[in-house]
Image (cartoon, helix red, strand yellow):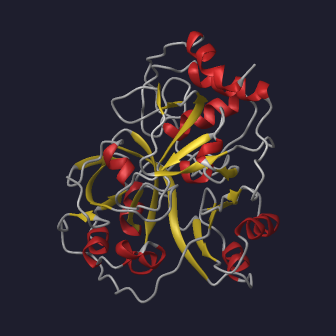
Amino acid sequence: MNRSSFSAIYLLSAVIVVVLATGAVVLAGMETIPEATKPVKRPSAMNRRLPTATPAADPVAPLKRRREAHLLVIGERTLSEEVVTRVRGRTEVTAVEQVDAARLTIAGRNVATMGVDPSSFRSYTPGPTARSDPLWQSIAAGDAAVSFGLETDGGLALGSSIQAAGQDLRIGAVATMGLGIVDAVVSRRTAQRLGLPQKNALLVSAPRADSARLKDALSRKLPRGVQVVVLKPAFTPARAGRSPSSLPDERIRAVLTAAASKLGAPYVWGAEGPDAFDCSGLIQWAFGRAGIRLPRVTHQQFASGPQVPFAQIRPGDLIFWRLDPTNPGYISHAAIYLGDGKMIQAPRTGDVVKIVPVHTRNLAGVVRVAGAN
C-alpha cells in the first residue's frame, strides 16, 4: 500500500471520544517528577510580570554569571550528602544547584513545579529571564512564575490568585526558565509552604560533557530511586545525501490508526490520554500503541530521531513548531504527519484532536522516529 493513502483509511476507522480527563506531568522518557505531599496582547519582551504582591522576604542577589543546566538528578525525598558529593565530584561537572521538585496540584492541574533560591537559580535561566530583577523579587516575595504554555493552554492568567495544594498562590510572572519539563517556579520558602520535598533534585551544569554519556555514568553510581534526566538532548541530523529509514509499514499503520481513533478527544493541558490529550501527549500515546516508547514533552520528542528535510516528509514523521513568544528557540508544538499534506494534532485549549492541512509557519523541523525502543 502507498503510504500517502494511509490517511483515508484512518479517517474511516476514527472513533469520536469526548470524555474529559487530565493526565500526569512527566519528564523525559518514563521518568516522573514525584507528587508533592500535602502542605503543612503579547509583549515583545521575553517575560511578563506584575509588581510584587509584597516586599521580598529575602533580598535577591544580582546576576553574576549565567550557566546552562544539562541534567536533572531527582529523587522522591531529600538527596543525601553522598549523592550530592558524587555528582559534584565528577570532573565534567562545573556547577550544581539544589532545588525542590514535585508535581503539584495548581488550579486543578498537575504541574511540574520547582522551588528555588532566586539568587542562585536565576543563573541557570535564559538571559532575559536571568537579568530581570523584578521577576526574581516577585518569586522571592511569594509569587509563582509560570510558563507560556501553562498560561495560555493551562488557563493560569497573569495576576490571578489561585489555589495550589490548598494554599493561595499568585501568578506574578509568565517567563521561560529554559527547562521544558518544568512549568512553574516558586521560592524555596513558598515550596515548603506548598508541601514540596526539600532539596530532592539537582540541576547539573556540564557544558563540555556529552550529556547522554554523563547521564549513564551518574545513573550507574547513584542509588536506586534517584533518576538522571537529560534536559536538553540534541537531535541527530540526517546524513547528507541519505534519507534515514522509517518505521516498518505495520508500525506506521498502528501509530496512525491509534491517533485517528482519538479524533474529537478534547485538548487538555498536560493530558496524555486515553480520553484527553495535549499535543505531545497524543504523540506519546499513539506511538506507545505501536510499541514505540517516546519522551513525554515536545522538545524531548524533537530528539527522538534524525531530522529530515520537509520535502522528504513521510507518514508517521513528527512535525515540530516554535510558537512560544517568551522563548523563540523552544520547541512548543508537535503533530503527526498522515500523508497527502495532512497531519493529526491536539491543537490547543478549547479545541479537539483533529486532522488539518500541514502549515509551515514557525516550523522547527521534521523528525523521523527510529524503530528502537
Q: Position of residue 311 (x, y in %)?
A: 61, 44
Q: Is residue 69 positioned above or below 113 on the image? A: below
Residue under the point 46% across and 45% down: 360
Residue under the point 33% across and 61% down: 145
Answer yes or no: is residue 248 visible. Answer: yes
The image quadrant of residue 119 is bottom left
Quadrant that contains the C terminus: top right
Q: Position of residue 208 (x, y in %)?
A: 68, 81
Frontmost residue, 273 versus 236: 236
Q: Position of residue 193 (x, y in %)?
A: 37, 59
Image side of residue 327 versus residue 310, left or right: left
Quadrant that contains the N terminus: top right
Image side of residue 189 versus residue 80, left or right: left
Residue under the point 37% across and 28% down: 351
Q: Is residue 102 positioned above or below 98 on the image? A: above
Q: Is residue 224 positioned above or below 251 on the image? A: below
Q: Position of residue 229 (x, y in %)?
A: 66, 60
Answer yes or no: is residue 222 visible. Answer: no
Residue under the point 51% across and 68% down: 99
Residue reaching furthest to the top: 12
Q: Is residue 170 positioned above or below 141 on the image? A: above
